[in-house]
Amino acid sequence: MGKVTGFLEIEREDRDYQPVAERVKHWHEFVLPLPEKEIRDQAARCMDCGVPYCHGTSRITGAPTGCPVNNQIPDWNDLVYRGNWDEAARNLHSTNNFPEVTGRVCPAPCEASCTLNIDENPVTIKSIECEIADRAIRQGLKPDKPQRKTGKKVAIVGSGPAGLACAQQLARAGHEVHVYERWAKAGGLLRYGIPDFKMEKIHVDRRIEQMQGEGIVFHYNADVGVNVAADKLLKEHDAIVLTGGSEKPRDLPIPGRELKGIHFAMDFLPQQNRRVSNEPQGNVEPILATGKKAVVIGAAIPAPTASARRSARARLRSPISKSCRSRPSTRIRCSPGPTGRSSCASPQVRRKGSRANLPC
């Protein structure tokens, strides 16, 4: 896949960030895309692996460690290298309903599993995926309507990533799909849990518009079991899919937990996302970090990548991130390569003797 000798000739180069002085002035995404030539060069680094672990299993334990949605990564890397962007987009969408989302927020276990990651820097899979998706969307995101209808009616409870993907697949199979969302807008974690600097909500809105064009009906402020009777859904639909997700946080029963000013990330983040989008907050007590010193405990995606930076953007005195695990689970930016861009974004510990840059 890619250029046969590409991994020997081309160094890894990933997307760069806007300067700090610029990105603290706004809430928008601040990752700078690579030019087309550099994206194609990065795709050329994809090796002709005997076993492509990027969507396979661990070299050590045999457990699944690559792409959770089974993206055909070597295939679309080769298509990008050859400049066949349309076919690359078709291939990517065959396994992934929303690649513009995963290309922004996925922690990229595919890169940690890349064969090149043994002794070199892995292929910039996440950046290539994001560019394929964004390029396809710029050409026009059209509804994909089914050729025939089945006559079956399905209710989806919850409009997070699982609910949206399920709804789109069922609609394209010819079913009549109704999505019930308890909040004022669709998206779930995509809208209320991920801050705009990681993924702007235009990406969610575009997909919702596409899905509505495919015949999917969205019911907002519809809290099933509260203001929408579950019995009613059972009577009016042939099947019900529960995609409400889990909103139960992991608590820490430690001394001082009962003190004021201690909040779960998913109590804090939705409020700020609603402020940015000028959406009503409802009858909740505001959680604001302006002018305060904060500690973020935890290292999953909602913690350091969201809470810490949102706190810093709110002109916090000093945001600090702490993890109760041995190492953070999010991607780590490393020291820049020869062109000034980061040459490594894998959270995995490198093998002894590797020429790759270690995490900062």
Image (cartoon, rainbow, N blue to C red):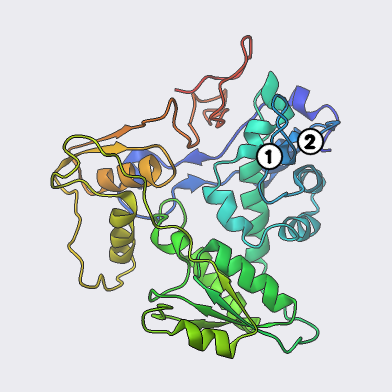
Residue 177 location, quadrant:
bottom right
Q: Earlier in the sequence, mark 2 or mark 1?
A: 2
Q: Residue at point 28% right, 54% down?
A: 268
Q: Secondary structure at mark 1?
A: loop
Q: Amino acid at mark 1?
A: Gly
Label 1 CA crowd tier, 10 Å (few <14, some 14–19, many 20+)? many
Q: Secondary structure at mark 2?
A: loop
Q: Give 9 or 118, whichever is nearer the viewer.
A: 118
Q: Looking at the rendering, in which quadrant would you find the C terminus?
A: top left
Q: How many marks?
A: 2
Residue 149 location, quadrant:
bottom right
Q: Give 13 or 357, whichever is nearer the viewer.
A: 357
Q: Residue at point 70% right, 31% down?
A: 58
x, y (%) of residue 251?
A: 31, 44
Horizontal side of 164 relative to 182 (left or right) equals right
x, y (%) of residue 75?
A: 81, 46
> Is residue 124 shown to the viewer in this render?
no
Q: Amino acid at mark 2?
A: Pro
x, y (%) of residue 17?
A: 46, 40
Residue 38 location, quadrant:
top right
Horizontal side of 339 relative to 255 (left or right) equals right
Position above or below: 125 against 247: above
Q: Looking at the rendering, in which quadrant would you find the N terminus?
A: top right
The mark found on residue 147 in the picture is none
Instruction: Give the labeled residue for mark 2.
Output: 52
Marks 2 and 1 in Cβ contact (< 8 Å)? yes
Q: Give 137 or 213, whichever is nearer the viewer.
A: 213
Instruction: Give the labeled residue for mark 1.
Output: 66
Q: Residue at point 43% right, 80% down?
A: 220
Position above or below: 86 against 327: below
Position above or below: 225 against 124: below
Q: Residue at point 64% right, 29% down?
A: 12
